[in-house]
Image: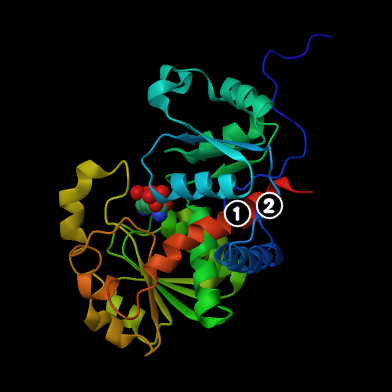
Amino acid sequence: MNAPAIQANRNKVRHFLTLTDLSSGEFRSLINRAIELKAMQHRGEIFEPLKNKVLAMIFEKSSTRTRVSFESGMAQFGGHAIFLSPRDTQLGRGEPIQDSARVLSSMTDCLMVRTFEHEKAELLAEYSSVPVINGLTDDVHPCQLLADMQTWFEQRGDIRGKRVTWVGDGNNMCHSYMHAARLLGFKLIIACPEGFEPDEVFIDETRDAIEITQDVRTACTGSDLIVTDVWASMGQEEEQKVREQAFSDFQVTPELMALANEDALFMHCLPAHRGEEVSADVIDGRQSVVWDEAENRLHAQKALLEFLLVD
Ligand code: CP
Ligand code: NVA
């Protein structure tokens, strides 16, 4: 009997396409491991569990943090990372994602993808014989949440039962915060303008953990953590002007921070636009932990790579 020309990979391979690919316990273990790996790195300890392992990284959107954290992480672990962009690979000339998945996964130990449609990352995973990591899609940004939650745990301990406020667009970052709220047991208040709410699919998945409102002041009152993101995400550049108007009351300012608890933190995945979604005095102020948050991409993703690739 002839095998089908293109056959999905049926092996049991662990992927990380959304946070819900982890159990709550696994999420917590990854956070703890990331904190340990950070301490080891800061002590200058050499730890190379991925010697001779290769990560292929497909970037169909721009990146600073995701690219550098994965590349550095693989180097520090004794392995290697390859940067692939559609501009100079056959991916940009229409080679099917299924074919690319089979070829790349036959030569490497792990794939990372940053792309537009989430379905593309799913298809890559379906046809890959090695783990696939989502480095951001239009729908979710799970790697960023590993780093954000590591940052919270380092600064404040467990997040269970805390009140977290998302201010702004119901976008990929917001969706991953919704997943994190469900998995780690915090309450997420989402303050967004009408028409910019999170996607219904994510609302259905996380209903008990979230609340959605247009009242940004009430949403920030008594909050433990205030988080925001750009008003126009990658791929929405043409909507910038319309969005600036729609979101004009949703800038995180010192006045909004003052409604939160005294020891509330401020996070932003970066890159940030000072004077749009956040004022300079908040992002550069005493409650902001954005630089730890950015550095933690390195440590959290090393914990993830170890989890996926080391038996
Ligand atoms: N936060 C984040 O993912 O940053 P980059 O777009 O620079 O990778
Ligand atoms: N929501 C942003 C996150 C960037 C890291 C975007 O998708 O562009």
Q: What quarter of the picture does the N terminus occupy?
A: top right
Q: In which quarter of the image is residue 7?
A: top right
Which of 48/280 is in front? 48
Amino acid beneath label 1: Lys
The amino acid at mark 2 is: Glu
Element under disc 2: helix
Q: Where is residue 114 in the image (x, y as percent from the top left)?
A: 46, 40
Residue 57 visible in this rendered orientation of the protein: yes
- Mark 2 crowdedness (10 Å alpha carbons): few <14, some 14-19, many ≥20: some
Figure quadrant of residue 262: bottom left
Outermost bottom residue: 262
Q: Which residue is drawn at 30% across and 81% down?
A: 257
As drawn, the residue found furthest toward the right would be 1
Label 2 with label 1: CB-CB less than 8 Å:
yes
Task: Give the percent coordinates (x, y) of residue 70.
Answer: 52, 47
Front one among 109 and 166: 109
The residue to which callout 2 is attached is 306
Would you say residue 17 is visible in this rendering? Answer: no
